[in-house]
Image (cartoon, helix red, strand yellow):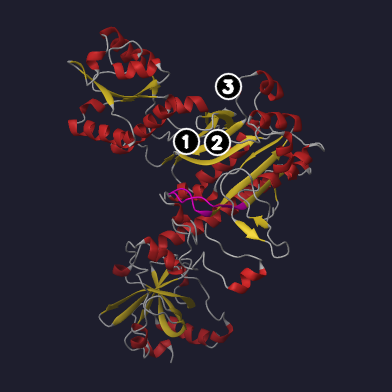
Amino acid sequence: MSLVSQSNNPEVTDQQTSDFCKKENAINTIHEYRTHNCSQLRKNHVGELARISGWIHNKRDHGGVLFIDLRDHYGITQVVIYPNRAFQKKIAHLAKETVIRFDGLVALRSTENINPKIPTGEVEVVADSFIVLGESETTPFSIFPEDPLPEEMRLEYRFLDLRRSEIHKNIVMRSKVIAHIRKLLTEMGFNEYQTPILTSSSPEGARDYLVPSRLHPGQFYALPQAPQVFKQLLMVAGFDRYFQIAPCFRDEDARADRSPGEFYQLDMEMSFVTQEDVFKIVEQVLGDVFTTFSDWKCDEIPFRKIPYREAMVKYGTDKPDLRINIEIQDVSEYFLDSGFKIFSDTVKDGGVVRAIPLKGGGAQPRAFFDRMVQFAQSLGSQGLAYLVWNDDGIKGPIAKFLAPEKIEQLSSDLEVKSGDVVFFVCNEEKTANKLAGEIRLKLGKELDLVEKNAYRFCWITDYPMYEYNEESRKIEFSHNPFSMPQGGLEALNTMDPLRIKAFQYDIVCNGIELSSGAIRNHRPQIMYRAFEIAGYTKDQVDKRFGALIKAFRYGAPPHGGIAPGIDRMIMLLTDEPNIREVIAFPMNQKAQDQMMNAPANVNENQLKELNIKPVQY
């Protein structure tokens, strides 16, 4: 049955239907499923025969005329089926999400039916024939409209959830970002190499995922927590610039910005580089990616560099969100001899006082201050002191404990004026930093002080090489044991270990750590000494890190690298608060794949083959 006798669309002219008849004779010569995707048809295609395939996204019946929104990976095209088509009722009864192919003539939509929200909004396909390619049952939830759903259901039916526009767009964005990164790095002289997935268990870091060996009963491989050792060995082998979109596996608990089980990182390593060389490369890549894939404001390169100790004082964290224009300050000296005994005694015992100044905060109602005190207490603080600067004086619970001259000097140093408020926390340094940092973030969110539509990057540098563990009463590595200490062997031999800094660095964006990196310790004698300070013998280093230390004995170049997390980058680019929104098939918070039912029990024959017998401790 031809379109000539059946169409009553006023936009289809006699000439167009005549053209269609000519083209209809060649219909068997065109592609079996489509001549165009569902985002391609435009006004210049009017009068042409089109074959399109996709999912029934939505159906509407307007006065007996059936409209189908047909969706594929690329977009949506409207298909119209007039009542004089014999198949109209059959299509009307098909479930949404059925996969279907339509043949028909491209026609202009009437003016009142134009949809400016989609690229194909000026045209429609007047259906002349159809074939059902994949019939759908009623879906357990709506693909359109995209109503909120429990995460458990979304993950169980992830193949359906991925059809919804926002998450589909996120996964496409992920693919494009990775392709763009590969292009950038290749143009910058990097080569992509693949490192092993089955490797040895790591004695440091997070818990490993272990894989039993069939050929070697009782022995195990481990999935790599990162390609760290392998990428350093590539540098020793003479490959100058390496990168990989690397899968990493860590048996860690889930967080909003951390996926349990597995994640992907842009793993990079370079020979004959300084710390600044690494910074320049990473800034070029991240700057390009974030300006290409987002229209938000982005810091120009070079990014700001903040030493670790400065970050801990000013922001209370080594992952500062620089979109919040609040800087914490150390004001311990003002309370050392004050009448506020709780603070003065803590400072005398080695503690600190941190001030969090809030411009214009003095105008807030009493309820706001009560909420802030309660928040501080929820973090483990005994309370939260504050001073409010007003035209008629300085008020607050601790005002009476400070001499006028100290308050005047405090006002000058904190650069506060009438209408401002300053919050104070007092504790041992590590705890005070954390409390002040959390209060700073709370103020930013509570008062809507977080800069909108902006990416604010920074490098955190000069991490301490070691820290003192109060529980074990031992000196331990604070960050990365394979980093080069600043000052090299001389620093290790002559300095207080707790004052030694390392060539370690983090790249942070909007309060999210994208990656840690370091200039590596590539000299055996420096590595042995660095581990000796942390309580390791030479034999222990040889046993635990044998391949690396052996390789360094045969001429290793200075090298360094970094590995920004792909998942977190996409989170930022899509403005998603949860990492599972940018991973095609994520696990839930309990590290379970609800769709594939993993982890799961295996049969006895599989265990027997692997010489494994389950035992619960």
Drawn side of residue 203 relative to residue 41, left or right: right
> Could you tell me if residue 331 is visible in this image?
no
Q: Which residue is mark 2?
A: 506
Q: CA distance from mark 3 to mark 1?
A: 21 Å
**Which residue is rendered at x = 57% and y = 35% of the image?**
479
Assess disc 2: are there few (<14), some (14-19) or many (≥20) residues with their C-alpha within 10 Å of its C-alpha: many
Circle 1 crowding by C-alpha within 10 Å: few under 14, some 14–19, many from 20: many
Which circle's residue, 2 or 3, is located before the other in the chain? Answer: 3
In the drawing, does residue 133 fall left or right of residue 210?
left
Question: Vertical placement of 309 versus 56: above or below?
Answer: above
Residue at image coords 44%, 51%: 574
In this view, the residue farthest toward the right is: 554
- Amino acid found under the numbered disc labelled 1: Lys
* Magenta highlight: main SS: loop
Q: Position of residue 441 (x, y in %)?
A: 36, 35
Q: Nearer the viewer, residue 263 or 180?
A: 263
Which residue is under mark 3?
499
- Amino acid type shown at disc 2: Asp
Q: From which residue to which does the magenta span run?
A: 246-261
Residue 247 drawn in magenta: yes
Q: Between residues 492 and 158, which one lies in front from this camera angle? A: 492
Q: Is residue 26 above or below residue 200?
A: below
**Which residue position is annotated with label 1?**
319
Residue 237, located in which quarter of the rendered image? top right
| Lower position in the chain sequence, tag 1 or tag 2 | 1
User: In which quadrant will I find the N terminus?
Assistant: bottom left
User: CB under 8 Å between callouts 1 and 2?
Assistant: yes
Quadrant location of residue 483?
A: top right
Label 1: element kind: loop
Indicate the quadrant where residue 98 lies.
Answer: bottom left
> What secondary structure is marked by label 3?
helix
